[in-house]
Image: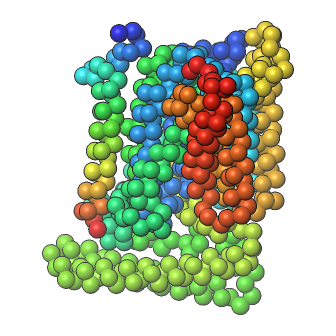
Amino acid sequence: MNVLDFAVLIGSMLAIAAYGTWHTRRQQTLRHYLKGDESVGWLTIGISVAATQASAITFISTPGQGYESGLDFVQNYFGMPLALILIAAVFLPIYRRLNVYTAYQYLGHRFDAKTRLLGAALFLVSRGLAAGITIYAPAIILSTVLGWRLDLTIILSGLLVIVYTVAGGSQAVSLTQKYQMAVIFGGMVAAFVILLMKLPASLGDALTVAGGFKKLEAVSLSTDLHRRYTFWTGLLGGFFLSLSYFGTDQSQVQRYLSGSSLRESRLGLMFNAVLKIPMQFFILLLGVMVFVFYQFEQPPLYFNQAAWRQAVRRDPGEHLQALEQRFDAIGAQKEQFIRRWLDAKHAGNRAAAAAARAQALAALDRSNAVRAQARAAVQAADPGAQSNDADYVFVTFILDHLPHGLIGLLIAAFFAAALQSKSAELNALGSTTTVDFYRHLLKREASDAHYVAASKWFTFFWGLVALAFALFANLVENLIQAVNIVGSVFYGVMLALFLVAFFLKRVGGTAVFWAALAAQTLVFVLYFSLSISYLWYNFIGCAACVLLSLILQAALGSNSPAAGA
Amino acid sequence: MDADERTGLPGLRTWSGVYLFVFGCFVLWVVLLLALTASYS
């Protein structure tokens, strides 16, 4: 990166943060601070919902996923449009009719105070624990690639987001997210166009190469349970995951409750229901095109080049340099096979094209085998190093092949993505702590100015928790997986609380409260005694809580009537 | 019909119509992705 890149990076980040802080500097009521005075239009809501979901990892890792595995990850989002339709039709009108600040206030209206606090506590624990990762994960990649100190990267990006989230509240989050998304998509589209211009093949040939290497298999109707991404897992798993995330997670609920009317909130959600699949497709296709580009241009053997250089320094036998030479030789051979394959295709010689393609595929297998050896060598040199270098593919491409200025814009885009999801999380944690705990339990009668101040302090507190977690995160083994496990362990029961509230009208607060505690205990017991995939706990927690609620309500009978919805 | 019930969208007067349109877009994306998969497999 040169001076121009740093000017673009720092200028765009500070300008967006300053705009959000300045534009919202006169907020005095709690409603304005938490909901932006409900004045936000559907486009801002739509972009804000998309931005909250899309963290930096989405824009850094997803192209890497496209590079490694092709387009099949897009199926993960197939359940989302259906879940958003259900939320817009059922969840949203109820939230708006009751005029709630948080989703958990609804549980208080529908059931009772203890169920409300349980829902809010489940959110604070799961989201609070996950908060650090949205700063830590992109910081570790960006600091490695840019050669910056990890702790300074975390502190600087963390403080920036705390300042404008605390100062501006919900409206600042929505306003800044709009411009951050503009920076992100401006950068991604520019990268895509330049990538296509740099390709030594036409777009048609690039797609032929990608298809020949099985990178364009976007949809699989396979019923193989061991296959991670299929149409069916995306539709069913994606539906429940999206329903839980968009319908009950305050970081999302707060985004669409800021709409000036039910219509604006609904249209904001429908905007995402229509555009999420093509957006993910585009990001994955970008990764696939980077893969095609590196079939004509020699890629590094290991994309996390800092980790690779460290491994090479610790390799006295020069075994790793030999690996690099072998990898380069296979790459040159592979390029020849691909050019032969495309020439034969243009000449209409199908047999020759098929033969050259088979040779290219075999060369790719050999090349992947060498990469696996390199990965093992890096792990052996530093057992704490991240073994998956796919996260570094897109950043490496940007730094090595894009013009200066655009490099700064793309790095700004990654920081923007890290800040926008972080700000929405902090905003939601601060408002849930204020509304569901502080105002509900500790200080019921106070001025609006008091609650705004309290909300700012709680947002600041959660910001410091996230910063501390991110700074000490490298002390924890398998951090990302640990955070995902925490989410899966709590999400199922949280979704069940809302499903019972919406659809099982005869179940009351006492039944669902004890059912939720029992289901959460069951999930903990199963987690420590079984070795199944953690994703199953979403379903187990949800199903157990719904079933136990029905059984308990039947046992309690009319002594525990359901509260009115 | 109160203000919140109006969609304000040309050609889509009811929310059921909007949801059907969104569902139609979802089906269209899946069909296009299936066609891409079939074309290059």
Q: State the image coordinates of residue A292 (x, y, percent, origin top left).
A: 39, 66
Q: Is residue A71 above or below residue A359?
A: above
Residue drawn at (71%, 91%), measured in percent from left and top?
Answer: A317
Foreground: A250 or A539?
A: A539
The answer to whether residue A200 is seen in the rendering is no
Vertical relation: A367 (above or below) A264: below
Instruction: Out of B26 and A82, give the one closest to the viewer.
Output: A82
- Which quarter of the rendered picture does the C terminus of chain A lie within? top right
Instruction: Tell me where residue A500 appears, x and y as whole percent.
Output: 56, 34
User: A565 left or right of A29?
Assistant: left
Is A286 rendered above or below residue A549?
below
Report the residue that reaches farthest toward the bottom: A317
Q: Position of residue A140 (x, y in %)?
A: 70, 56
Placement of A541 over or under A64, stated as above or below? above
Colour convention = rainbow
Quick check: can you spot residue A150?
yes
Quadrant assignment, res A518:
top right
Q: Nearer the viewer, residue A273 or A160?
A: A273
Give the residue drawn at x 24%, y 62%.
B39
Examine the image and state in which quarter residue A512 appears.
top right
Taking the view exactly as shown, the residue that stands out farthest to the left is A348
Which residue is at a point 41% across and 59% down the rendered structure image?
Answer: A230
> Residue A409 occupies which quadrant of the picture?
top right
Q: Relative to residue A560, is residue A365 drawn left or right?
A: left
